[in-house]
Image: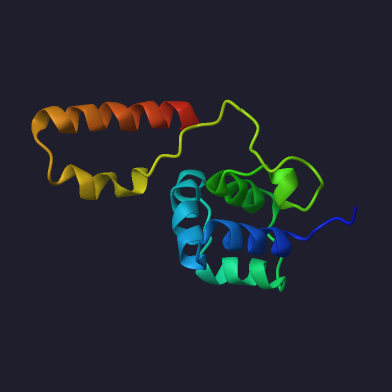
Amino acid sequence: MEKKTIAERLKQIIDEDGLRQVEIAEKCRPLCAQFGLKMNRSDISQYISGRAVPKQNKIYILARALNVSEAWLMGFDVPKERPERNEPPIAPYYELETIAKDMDAGQLSRLLEYAKMLKQYKGD
């Protein structure tokens, strides 16, 4: 069987799941923030068109955000399903300040504990 391209796999996901490029970018945003990377709709458009190929770290983010295996996304003839792994949670901590504005003291305390846990898990 012929190996597929990342562009073909992304198009397949778009067709099967009815996603738009902006929705893929939104799914990637928390992981990009978590790992200190940038990936916007323009980047995704480049990947889908085949004009650019994502580097390994962005393949990981795309695969994780889309819940597919990296090998499948890269075009290999392997199962699409993402294998079970001990991965850090997808943490939208870039939104914590906005969320915290509307919290009472108890909720804010729990949020701070969550942020500490994320920082500890991430190794900061």
Residue at 58% x, 66% y is 44
**Compared with residue 48, is residue 107 higher up or lower down, i.e. above or below?**
above
Q: Is residue 110 left or right of residue 58?
A: left
Q: Nearer the viewer, residue 111 or 15?
A: 15
Residue at 19% x, 42% y is 100
Residue with the most extreme front position: 16
Residue with the most extreme right position: 1
Q: Is residue 77 left or right of residue 9?
A: right
The spot of residue 24 in percent (x, y) is: 51, 59
**Quadrant in the rendering for residue 83:** top right
Q: Nearer the viewer, residue 113 or 123?
A: 113
**Compared with residue 12, is residue 110 higher up or lower down, i.e. above or below?**
above
Q: Nearer the viewer, residue 122 or 77?
A: 77
The spot of residue 16 in percent (x, y) is: 59, 57
The spot of residue 2 in percent (x, y) is: 89, 57
**Compared with residue 15, is residue 105 higher up or lower down, i.e. above or below?**
above
